[in-house]
Image (cartoon, rainbow, N blue to C red):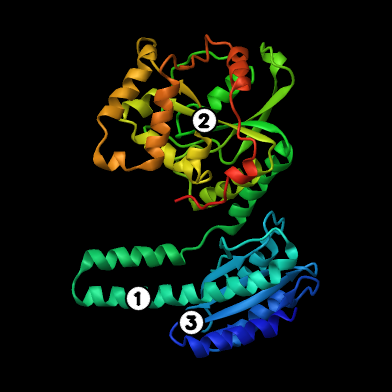
Amino acid sequence: MDIDNILSTRLEELQQKFPTRFSKSIYVLKAVHDNVPTGWKERLIEARRKGNGQRVILIPYNIEGLHWIGILLKFETDRKIELAQLMDPVEYSDFSPEKLGNELKEIYPDTLLRWTYVEKHRDVQQSASITIKNLLKAAEEVQLTYERGTDTCSIDLKDENWQAALTTMKILFKELSSLNMQELFTLIEEADKVVYLIKDKNIILFFGITGSGKSTTIHFLAGSQMERVIVTTSPFAQSETRYITAVTVNFKDVGAFTDGSIILCDNPGFGNTHRAEFDIANAIGIVRAVKGCRSVKPVVLISYGNIANRCCDVKELAHAVGEPMPRIKDHIETFFYIFTKFPDDEKGKIHELLRDINCELTEEEKSDTNFRIVLKDMLHKTRRSALALNPIKDQPGEILDELAESLSISHPDEAFEFYIAK
């Protein structure tokens, strides 16, 4: 495929058909091939000379002959790049853009190469046509976002509508702010290590708000000895788990009667305060990992604080679980609930606490589909008893045997979907 000519031809057609959406200040440069050592630097220097002022540069980039990616550069002035986006359309791609990002910074020191989530396909042979589509779509979106945003902001400022102007400026800032590409891809690489470890394996995947005790529970189930200590903490909890991790546990080693082993997967807590790089890396890493599993048992951890907060945290958790698992209702029967950090005198009241919350739902909460699905399931499964974990006194083997007998998602590749965390 002659990607240069096809991309240029389609751009010209769109510029003629939609002149307001595809301005004349969008340029296509000749494709770069990774086997030409100086090709990328040459194209970056050429981009500086192509046109002047505000403009958008589109560059196809070829990796090892078949794999195509796209790069968009948005210039603010003749020599200053406002936005640099990389678009890799190959699902499960192992391409690292570190070299491209470093060479970009050599010529444009203040510029970071920003990874952008785009349409993907597993077949690398489809990457050329998808890259053309992605580049043209990105060029249109960048231009429209800038033009509409600045025009709207200008009108609001003239009308002294300060709040509306501030809102628009925040949207523009979000669109144009750069990600730390090197950190992002380091996190993705770390998460990818788990992909191979749990491929075609049966796993237990833990979900929970930051501070709900996921890591502690996994340590307990893996056989770690627990003791109670008093520590002073900040009121602003932050997840210590930076990316999805996996621990293999032999059932017999922890006193269970089930044969074989199981893999326990910890993932960063929802609602933590990590930056966008962590959100994006984990949105990709978690789903990529579980899609390759043989089966998945979702275990949801709810702490006493989550319940005491009128289930506000449970609502957030239900939304977060629903992002990678959009058809949550189809798989809710596989959910297993563990309640953590409950005082001894409250452990027998879990169903009652949930029932009170259900009776006092506001109209807004009643219309929250995912929250209602999860809350209703929790009510059903805690009617007779609820598992309130005490990691000091309880036996991990007993809980693992119970988990082993619970239902699993047998086709995780269909149940989980890629998403970008909000």
Q: Is residue 313 left or right of residue 135?
A: left
Image point (38%, 37%), residue name? 371
**Foreground residue, 180 or 175?**
175
> Horizontal and vertical percent for residue 158?
21, 77
> Would you say the residues marked 2 and 3 are in contact, meaning their CB atoms lie under 8 Å apart?
no
Q: Which mark is residue 77?
A: 3
Q: Which mark is residue 378?
A: none
> Would you say the residues marked 3 and 1 are in contact, meaning their CB atoms lie under 8 Å apart?
no
**Precedes in sequence: disc 3 or disc 1:** 3
Secondary structure at numbered mark 2: helix
**Precedes in sequence: disc 2 or disc 1:** 1
Secondary structure at numbered mark 3: loop
Query: Looking at the image, can residue 340 be seen?
Result: no
Q: Is residue 180 left or right of residue 99?
A: left
Q: Quadrant of residue 297?
A: top right
**Foreground residue, 276 or 361?**
361
> Horizontal and vertical percent for residue 171?
37, 64
> Horizontal and vertical percent for residue 303?
42, 25
Q: Which residue is mark 1?
A: 150
**Precedes in sequence: disc 2 or disc 3:** 3
> Horizontal and vertical percent for residue 58?
60, 78
